[in-house]
Amino acid sequence: MKSPRIVVIGSSNTDMVVKSERLPAPGETVTGGQFLMAAGGKGANQAVAAARLGAEVTFIAKVGCDMFGDQAIAGYRKEGIRTDFILRDPQHATGVALILVDQKGENLISVASGANHALSPDDVLQAAEAIRAADVVVLQLEIPLNTVAAAAAIAAEVGVPVILDPAPAPQGPLDPALLRNVTCVKPNETEAERLSGVAVRDEESARLAAAKLLASGVRSAVITLGAKGAFWTEGEQAGFVGGLRVEAVDSTAAGDAFSGALACGLARKQPLDEAVRYATVVAALSVTRLGAQPSLPTSDEVERFRATLNRATS
């Protein structure tokens, strides 16, 4: 089977992670933590997730002319990701994320965006040919909104499906002109509430929020509810995929694992419900490991995990 072609446009960061027994309160120091430094950024995480699941991935991003940028590009090449459109910025440093994780896998994240916020619509236009040739384009909001809009417009012009992961959560509704070019919007509960105005707590409230998102112009919506699962809707169809019980270690990249897997499923022409079930499995496996990109599984690991789940329920 031919590998699906996925273009990811987004952020590239270096993650500095400290895992401690608990998250500190404001002004408090918590000692005794475990330190990990790894490649991250929502765009990069989703690109790596899709590549490890068997997709042919092109990543469009901007990094600094520094050690972290060198390491990031070398890492993407090792993953088999096409890096022709990763630009170097002499004026801004590579993005950095400081991440605190507790024993339950909950996290707090602070990001210095650096070169990510210098990725421009003109930069994306340089990669228009790759975008038009993709089976699916994946976007997030750790780069400027006008750059996101430009990429979505290029894809929509030729009918390439666009997945928008609206993270970090916007402060309010997104531009309807952008959403009309989005095939599938994939927020979590917080992001869905900010986009729709509906507080998402369960399946029913997710259904209400999703209806508002569809009314804004997108063709389908997937709202993730953490360990509870995910609600999906497309046209007149809708459903809920329950979460999987796993021992969570770090949830940092769970949403990115989900998005990368969802992109792979849709690029392989899976129905939305099937793609959501696949993404749920991939995300559940990712939270059992520490770190962002180190937690992202390969397709073989996912199949072994699925076999374990099947034996547990049989």
Image (cartoon, rainbow, N blue to C red):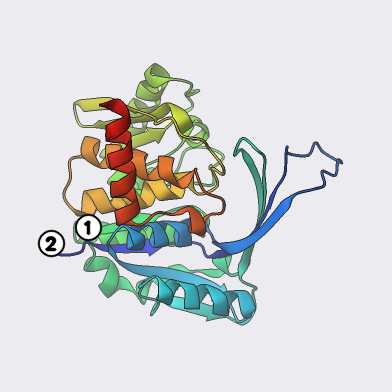
Asked if marks 1 and 2 touch (Cβ < 8 Å), the reply is no
> Which of marks 2 and 1 precedes in the sequence?
2
Q: Which mark is residue 160?
A: 1
Q: Residue at x 65, y 73 (%)?
A: 93
Q: Nearer the viewer, residue 122 or 45?
A: 45
Q: Secondary structure at mark 2?
A: loop
User: Crowding at label 2, few (<14), some or many (≥20) Cα neighbours within 10 Å?
Assistant: few
Q: Residue furthest left?
A: 1
Q: In the figure, is residue 309 to the left or right of 88?
A: left
Image quadrant in which you'd find residue 296? bottom left
Residue that carries the numbered disc 2 in the rendered image: 1
Q: What separation in Å lies between label 1 and label 2 (alpha carbons)? A: 20 Å
Q: x%, y% of residue 144? A: 51, 59
In this view, the residue in front, 18 or 274, is: 18
Structural crowding at the residue carrying mark 1, measured as other residues with C-alpha within 10 Å and reported as few (<14), some (14–19) or many (≥20): many
Helix, strand, or loop for circle 1?
loop
Amino acid carrying mark 1 in the image: Val
Three-letter amino acid code at disc 2? Met
Please tell me whether residue 303 is drawn above or below residue 132 in the rendered image: above
